[in-house]
Amino acid sequence: MQILAEQGVPVPQEKLAKLLDIHDEEIDLFARRMRAMERDGQIMRNRKNAICIASKLDLIKGRIEGHADGFGFLVPDDGSPDIFLSPKEMHKVLHGDIVMGRVTGTDRRGRPEGAIVEVLEHVNHRMVGRLYSDHGIYYVVAENKRINQDILIPGGAENGAQPGQVVMVELMQQPNKYAQPIGRVVEVLGNYADPGMEIEIALRKHDLPHVFPPEVEKLCAKFTPTVQKKDMKDREDIRHLPLVTIDGETARDFDDAVYCERQGKGYRLVVAIADVSHYVRPGDALDKEGLNRGNSVYFPRRVIPMLPEVLSNGLCSLNPEVDRLCMVCDMVVDSKGEIKQYRFYPAVMFSHARLTYTKVADMLENPDGENARQYKVLLPHIQNLHELFLVLLKEREKRGAIDFETTETQMIFNDQGKIERIVPVKRNDAHRLIEECMLAANVCASDFLHQHEHPTLYRIHEGPTPEKLENLHEFLREFGLALGGGDDPHAKDYAKLLAKVKDRPDAQLLQTVMLRSLQQAVYSPDNVGHFGLAYESYTHFTSPIRRYPDLLVHRAIKAVLNGERYKPGSWSELGLHCSMTERRADDATREVEAWLKCYYMQDRVGESFAGTISAATGFGIFVALDDVYVEGLVHITDLGNDYYHFDPAKHQLVGERTGRRFRLGDRVQVKVARVDLETSKIDFVLEISPEEEARQAESGEGSPWKGGKKGDHGPRDAKKTSPKDHGKHHHKKKSR
């Protein structure tokens, strides 16, 4: 790069090789390095094949983000504003491709508009979609709506698939300026409405690894079903402790077991976590696949585990009445809920019972009931756990952790694999008891590694950005409220305000806006604390079966105990990867839920429901229905005869003439107008009274808004205001 800059002009590759004193036997390696520098966007070749410095050509490297309507954006790597790309430019690329582009002007909305100069890397090689036939010509429409181009399938390359079926297609030719992409069918998944097809599509659309490679299966075949005597060597034996697991009714993998006893005025809390790191060794096939997956993915009725079943439901699951290897966090907690001492050690344990949240809650409420009698030996220890929980809860309040009240839902399925109903999941004291125990162990793990100055992946949650904080302050002023802490609020300030407004009729609205002002929690080696939980240092230690970061934390703790250092590579890159796999899993599960809810609602077109506005956007309002827990869009064209303007700071749409407001949290009555299984979108229309309908008919009112079509769920730049989650997914317990 220095020599190119010194030359001041484009340089042919042969001349550059001479300037760098490249020998003949090194020419191939040199050419390979040049190609890599091209892919990285450092250099480019001009029409004469001479090498240029890309930055001197005013070119911008970035990633393509497509839109279902054909246009797209170049998202620059340097964080500068996105560049609008017309459908003509998007014809050269597919969503996700890495390109070099140039700004050519501004579009009618004042955004920078550009052109693609060169495609550095095509990232789409396989995709899932539906096969269609038109006059004997086969083509595949990708399930990812950001990929707008049809993939042509030459005669004979359809591999026996029938039109309308869901297929995996492999690209044989990428798109270019003059031609569409061409592919061949490599897998026929089945018909679109087949039970479980929505999961099969989501797995492939989001590139979720779901088949364990042969080398993993080979490694798993070597494991015995029971813990071997040799594996118990150099471990503390805590099999005498009446440890129990407490999980949901449907759980099959048990990460953690707990035990509590009184110690003077305080308590001894033992949290035993499955010792996955004993079986999954750094760099082996299991470890590579675990890193690749990053976490288990919990779909409705199906789990894609991070580790094979022989471990996740077998050797690494703390099943009842069998010996298991574990890593223990042994804590001493005082009467105020402060952890005074803790100790980590590898151990062998024996779970004395597999309890459920429902059973534990019943045992606590009815100490003379049937469940309490069945587990009478364990009841005192469960009561100790509950006493400790109440103490930890007071400490949590004192600390100022934010406790948002959200409704999680669970889908109940029929025998055909379709939703029968959607029900809220009620959290009881047993859920919260386990959560507090896990938080305590996670804090100790974080403190242990921090004190020993050993790098690790912290679970970090930063406070609101200055922009989001200003919007929140402005919003709260409308209600005569203020968030404490000024420009640097703490979790305690949020908690105080939540407590202040909890009995107000608009409490749900205020809570939602406060929640949306916060950033997303991620994994990082930089310990900046956890804002929401009000911890200065926090990590994930308690679920190594289903989260790769927890496995890394276990290895780091073991390394410290052995006087060693654990070096898995770049901690920063691991943090970015694990945060990505977590988002990927969330996106996939949310998409499956959306499709299932569409299928559930398709027979309810025309029915009326009461609901709450869950988001206001520039193109309409999203409404979450009561009782059925399904969300849909009332498009701006269906809001009435007015010009509506979106106010992002106040989370509302306001009519220019009528002054009518549609604000986040407002109650509305809607009718289901349309359900589109193809796009997993549900459209509502506002219900109006017969009197209002007659008045509008008499006055000939109709909406003058022409900015979009029904079913259009918004342009890319509206994505920040569209709801993140169209219906909460009932994740496995203890995900913080």
Image: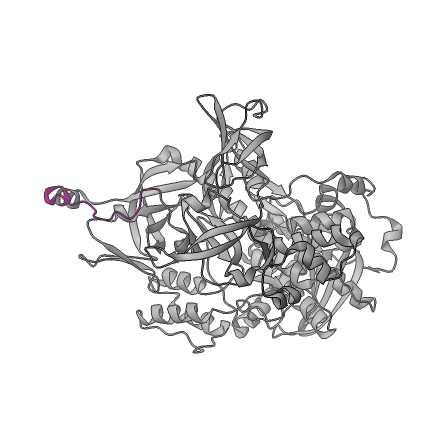
Q: Please identify the residue farthest to the bottom as the structure is shown.
A: 486
Q: How many marks?
A: 0
Q: Is residue 676 visible?
A: yes
* The magenta stretch spans residue 51: no
Q: Horizontally, is 225 left or right of 607 in the view?
A: right
The spot of residue 574 in percent (x, y) is 66, 59
Give me the residue at 78% from left, 54% from top.
Answer: 26
Q: Position of residue 346 (x, y in %)?
A: 80, 60
Please tell me whether the stretch drawn in magenta is mainly helix, strand or loop.
loop
Q: Is residue 414 left or right of residue 27?
A: left
Who is closer to the viewer here, 431 or 188? 188
Q: Quadrant of residue 562?
A: bottom right
| Residue 343 % position (x, y) | 75, 69
Please say which color scheme the image uses: one colour
Height in image: 607 above or below 517?
above
Spot occupied by residue 625 in the image (x, y as percentages of width and height): 37, 47
Tell me if I can see residue 254 in this picture: no
Q: Residue furthest left?
A: 698
Q: Is residue 406 left or right of residue 683?
A: right
Quadrant location, the N terminus:
bottom right
Q: Is residue 459 above or below residue 606?
A: below
Where, quadrant-wise, is the C terminus in this rendering? bottom right
Of residue 718 and residue 548, the one placed in the foreground of this image is 718
Q: Is residue 709 magenta?
A: yes
Residue 709 left/right relative to 641: right
Q: Read off the magenta span.
A: 696-711
- Which is more toward the observer, 176 or 27? 27
